[in-house]
Image (cartoon, grey):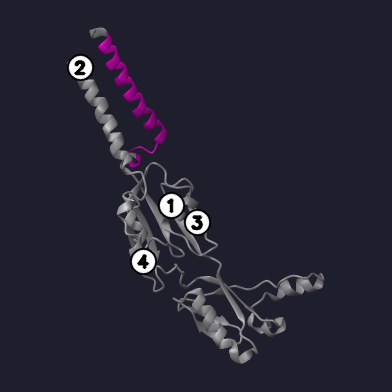
C-alpha cells in the first residue's frame, strides 16, 4: 500500500508540473486588469530611417507638369515606347543616406530622417508650390519595411510588411507563432535607431500590459528572438522527449493499477 501511495504521489507531481507549465503558455494573461483607456489614442506611424528605400510619386491634373518631379527609369520608358505599349513608367527608389537625406528632382537634397510619411508628403507639397499651378498629390511609400523573427517559432525568417505597421503578435503570426518550447515571458527585441544605437529589450508576452509597451509596435529592421525554454535547451529532440514523458506516466499508472489489483 505504501508503494501505491508513492506511485500516486509521483503521478500527481508530474500532472501538477504540467499544469504549472501551462500557465507560461497563454498570451496576455490577466487582460481584465489592463486599463486600455490610458493608452495613447494616436495611430502608429512609422518614421523614416537611414537605408530605407522609398518610392515618391507626384501627381497633378496635368501629367506633363509632374514629370520633372518623378524619378523614373529611362530604360523602362523607352522600352514601353518602342513596343507602343501604354503603361505607367517604372519609378526609381530613393535610398535614405546615413544622414537622413535624399536627392529629389529639381528640389535637390531633402532631409527626411525621423519624419513620418505624412510629414514628408506635406513638406514636398509645400516645396513644389512655386513650380506648379496647383497643389500636387504626393505619395510616399516604404519599399523595404521588413522585420525578422528567429528562435522558437514555426517559420523563422524575414518578412516584408506592406502596410508599414506591425505589432509583436502580428510578427509572431507571420512566423507561424511560437512553438511550445518558446519562452513567452522572455522574448528579445533587437533594435537599431536612426543614430546607430543598438538595444535589446525583453518582452513578457504572458503579461497583458505588453500592449502598452513602447515596443509593442515594431519598427523596420527590428529583430525578434524567441528564447527556447530549458527543456528544449537540454534536449533538442522534442519528439523523443515528449514520447518519453508520456510513456513514463503511462508506465507509472499501469504499475499502480497492477499493485491495486494484486493487493485486493
For the C terminus, give its image quadrant: top left
Give the answer, above or below, for where 6 lies relative to 184.
above
Q: Which mark is residue 3?
A: 2
Residues in magenta, as a range: 232-261
Give the Cα separation between the discs numbered 4 and 3.
19 Å
Residue 239 belongs to the span the image colors magenta: yes
Q: Position of residue 180 (x, y in %)?
A: 39, 41
| Residue at the image position 72 percent from the left and 83 percent from the top | 64
Dot 3 alpha-carbon crowd within 10 angstroms: few under 14, some 14 to 19, many 20 or more? some
Dot 1 alpha-carbon crowd within 10 angstroms: few under 14, some 14 to 19, many 20 or more? some
- Mark 4 highlights which residue? 198
Give the Cα separation between the discs numbered 4 and 1.
18 Å
| Residue 207 seen in the current view | no
Between residues 187 and 264, which one lies in front from this camera angle?
A: 264
Q: Position of residue 212 (x, y in %)?
A: 35, 61
Say left or right for 25 vs 81: left
Give the answer, above or below, for where 203 lies relative to 99.
above
- Mark 3 highlights which residue? 158
For the N terminus, give its image quadrant: top left
- Mark 1 highlights which residue? 150
Dot 2 alpha-carbon crowd within 10 angstroms: few under 14, some 14 to 19, many 20 or more? few
Say left or right for 130 vs 101: right
Contact flag, marks 3 and 2 (Cβ < 8 Å): no
Give the Cα separation between the discs numbered 2 and 4.
58 Å
Q: Which mark is residue 18?
A: none
Contact flag, marks 4 and 3 (Cβ < 8 Å): no
First in sequence: mark 1 vs mark 3: 1
Q: Position of residue 119 (x, y in %)?
A: 49, 78
Amino acid at each position: 500500500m505504501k508503494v501505491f501511495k508513492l506511485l500516486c504521489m509521483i503521478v500527481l507531481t508530474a500532472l501538477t508540473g504540467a499544469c504549472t507549465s501551462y500557465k507560461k503558455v497563454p498570451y496576455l494573461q490577466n487582460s481584465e486588469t489592463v486599463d486600455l483607456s490610458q493608452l495613447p489614442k494616436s495611430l502608429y506611424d512609422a518614421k523614416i530611417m537611414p537605408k530605407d528605400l522609398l518610392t515618391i510619386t507626384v501627381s497633378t491634373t496635368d501629367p506633363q507638369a509632374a514629370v520633372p518631379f518623378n524619378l523614373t527609369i529611362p530604360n523602362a520608358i523607352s522600352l514601353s515606347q518602342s513596343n507602343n505599349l501604354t503603361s505607367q513608367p517604372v519609378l526609381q527608389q530613393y535610398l535614405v543616406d546615413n544622414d537622413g537625406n535624399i536627392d529629389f528632382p529639381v528640389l535637390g537634397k531633402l532631409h527626411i530622417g525621423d519624419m513620418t510619411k505624412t510629414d514628408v508628403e506635406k513638406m514636398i507639397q509645400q516645396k513644389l508650390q512655386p513650380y506648379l499651378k496647383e497643389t500636387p498629390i504626393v505619395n510616399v511609400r516604404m519599399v523595404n519595411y521588413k522585420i525578422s523573427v528567429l528562435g522558437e517559432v514555426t517559420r523563422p525568417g524575414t518578412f516584408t510588411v506592406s502596410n508599414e505597421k506591425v505589432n509583436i503578435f502580428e510578427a509572431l503570426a507571420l512566423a507561424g507563432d511560437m512553438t511550445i518550447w518558446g519562452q513567452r515571458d522572455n522574448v528579445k527585441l533587437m533594435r537599431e535607431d536612426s543614430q546607430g544605437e543598438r538595444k535589446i529589450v525583453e518582452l513578457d508576452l504572458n503579461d497583458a500590459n505588453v500592449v502598452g509597451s513602447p515596443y509593442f509596435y515594431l519598427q523596420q529592421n527590428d529583430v525578434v528572438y524567441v528564447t527556447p525554454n530549458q527543456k528544449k535547451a537540454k534536449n533538442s529532440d522534442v519528439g523523443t522527449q515528449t514520447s518519453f514523458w508520456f510513456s513514463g506516466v503511462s508506465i507509472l499508472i499501469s504499475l499502480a493499477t497492477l499493485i491495486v489489483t494484486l493487493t485486493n
